[in-house]
Image (cartoon, grey):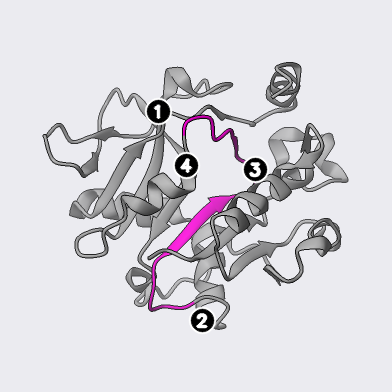
Amino acid sequence: MVKQAMIFAAGMGKRMYPLTETTPKPLVKINKDSLLVNNIKKLIKNNFDPIVINTFHFPEKIIDEVKDFKNYVNIVIEEVRLETGGGLLNCLKNNHLSWESPILLLNSDVYWIDNFYASIELISENWNSEFMDLILCMKNKKDLFGYNGNGDFELFKNKSKYKKLVFSNTPNLVFTGLQIINPKILKEKKEKIFSLKEVIMEGVKTGKAYGIIDRNPWFHIGTVKDLEGIRKLSV
């Protein structure tokens, strides 16, 4: 069972300048709640405990934003930016998270709507610790609002319930920012600062990284223009 979670909130949000010169990107609001609070509420609704949030950019503003959730969240302030992998490893080494059970990881600046089901439930129900190191929530790039990139991966074409992530020269799937990881795969990591992208790529190479395509609406918020577009939809 997946019940511990970490939200990555230590990014600088440089692509959203000048908005993020004074406000961390996770605190940007869509309707009445910030992106961060939206994601905390989803985790609480799905009974996650503990919920750890790392922060670096304007940490005092992050702390103030989540004060109403102090019984649910634990804030970890980084003295230097450790990136996603380093941030997770730091929390594990300092006992904010357990090595002994899988961890749901969530980028703090992602936004989606649980139209058909709870996306967190979907990915949790498809986790299998017997043969997975990671499982990533994916969207077809044409269905991800605001996304203009080249895509990330494809899924291995077979009839099994579980689909492995595979590399492709023309990938159609995009990683949403929601995933589950077996923390034990980081035990041998010597670096303090590294991205989880490296860990995901290694998982694809070894055949232990899986993906699941989500039907719920997801929104890519890379720029101020993206944000304005989402707000106009009044979602």
Which residues fall within the magenta stretch?
98-116
User: Which amino acid is tagged 2?
Assistant: Lys
Q: Earlier in the sequence, mark 4 or mark 3?
A: 3
User: Which amino acid is tagged 1?
Assistant: Gly
Q: Is residue 151 toward the left or the right of residue 129 in the image?
A: right
Residue 103 magenta-drawn? yes
Dot 4 and dot 1 residues touching (CB under 8 Å):
no
Q: CA distance from mark 1 to mark 3?
A: 18 Å
Task: Residue at the far left: name it.
Answer: 159
Q: Residue at x 54, y 51 (%)?
A: 106
Q: Residues within 10 Å of mark 3 (few under 14, many from 20)?
A: many
Q: Is residue 134 toward the left or the right of residue 195 in the image?
A: left
Task: Name the residue tied to disc 1.
Answer: 151
Q: CA distance from mark 3 to mark 2?
A: 25 Å
Q: Is residue 77 visible?
A: no
Dot 4 and dot 2 residues touching (CB under 8 Å):
no
User: Which amino acid is tagged 4?
Assistant: Ser
Out of 168 and 158, give the one closest to the viewer. 158
Task: Name the residue tied to disc 3.
Answer: 109
Dot 1 and dot 3 residues touching (CB under 8 Å):
no
Q: Position of residue 148 (x, y in %)?
A: 52, 20
